Image (spheres, rainbow, N blue to C red):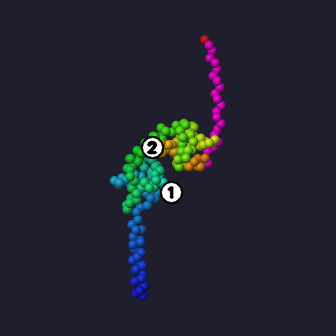
């Protein structure tokens, strides 16, 4: 009997060092977690996690960022920028993209593959030529990455969403001759 108690206590003592790290676990990245900067200011809230990327909602933007940009600590999840710095960086990127999104500019997918040229722009979308097909994408989803326009989707997904391009418009009829005076 005494041997069993010693064995049970020994097993429990061996398990304690293994359980201690689990008890002192750092906060994991999870939906709903508040992210702070190094000074303790709120940067935003994690609204979704998709593999190596997450969406962080600030006071003004939903920002897609790599999970490796965050550092869980004993009490919080840290990010290397303040909310104001992140908002300013997002707005600068949006301004750069707005200037770069022009008819004729070439769009790339999230892996850097060429999708095709932008053929038509309206206030909300860009129409992109993919071979003999076209696809409309939201202008807000187009970003400038390493000097190139890109969208966070794959070429295969864009091809699947594309439709045959409409035939070219017939040429305008010639203007009637002006009478001589």
What crowding class fits label 1: few (fewer than 14 Cα within 10 Å), some (14-19), or many (20 or more)?
few
Q: Main secondary structure of the magenta part?
A: loop
Image position, residue 97 (x, y; %): 48, 41
Residue pictured at 51% horizontal, 55% vertical: 50
Magenta part of the protein: which range?
A: 160-180
Residue pictured at 40% horizontal, 57% vertical: 71
Number of numbered discs on residues? 2
Q: Given the current orientation, which residue lies at the most extreme bottom position?
A: 1
Q: Is residue 122 visible?
A: no
Residue 73, located in which quarter of the rendered image?
A: bottom left
- Mark 1 and mark 2 lie on one chain; the one further toward the N terminus is 1
Q: Which residue is mark 1?
A: 51
Split into 4 quadrants, where in the image is the C terminus? top right
Q: CA separation, marks 1 and 2?
A: 23 Å
Image position, residue 104 (x, y; %): 55, 37
Q: Which residue is mark 2?
A: 93
Residue 26, located in which quarter of the rendered image?
A: bottom left
């Amino acid at each position: 009997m005494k041997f069993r108690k010693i064995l049970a206590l020994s097993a429990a003592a061996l398990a304690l060092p293994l359980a201690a790290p689990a008890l002192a676990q750092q906060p994991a990245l999870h939906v709903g977690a508040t992210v702070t900067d190094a000074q303790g200011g709120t940067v935003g809230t994690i609204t979704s996690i998709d593999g190596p990327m997450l969406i962080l909602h600030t006071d003004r933007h939903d920002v897609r960022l790599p999970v490796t940009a965050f550092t869980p600590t004993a009490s919080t999840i840290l990010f290397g920028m303040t909310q104001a710095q992140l908002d300013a960086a997002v707005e600068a990127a949006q301004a750069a993209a707005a200037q770069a999104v022009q008819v004729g500019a070439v769009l790339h997918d999230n892996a850097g593959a060429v999708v095709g040229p932008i053929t038509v722009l309206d206030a909300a979308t860009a129409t992109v030529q993919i071979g003999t097909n076209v696809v409309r994408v939201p202008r807000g989803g187009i970003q400038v990455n390493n000097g190139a326009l890109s969208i966070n989707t794959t070429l295969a997904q864009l091809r699947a969403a594309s439709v045959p391009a409409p035939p070219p418009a017939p040429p305008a009829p010639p203007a009637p001759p002006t009478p001589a005076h």
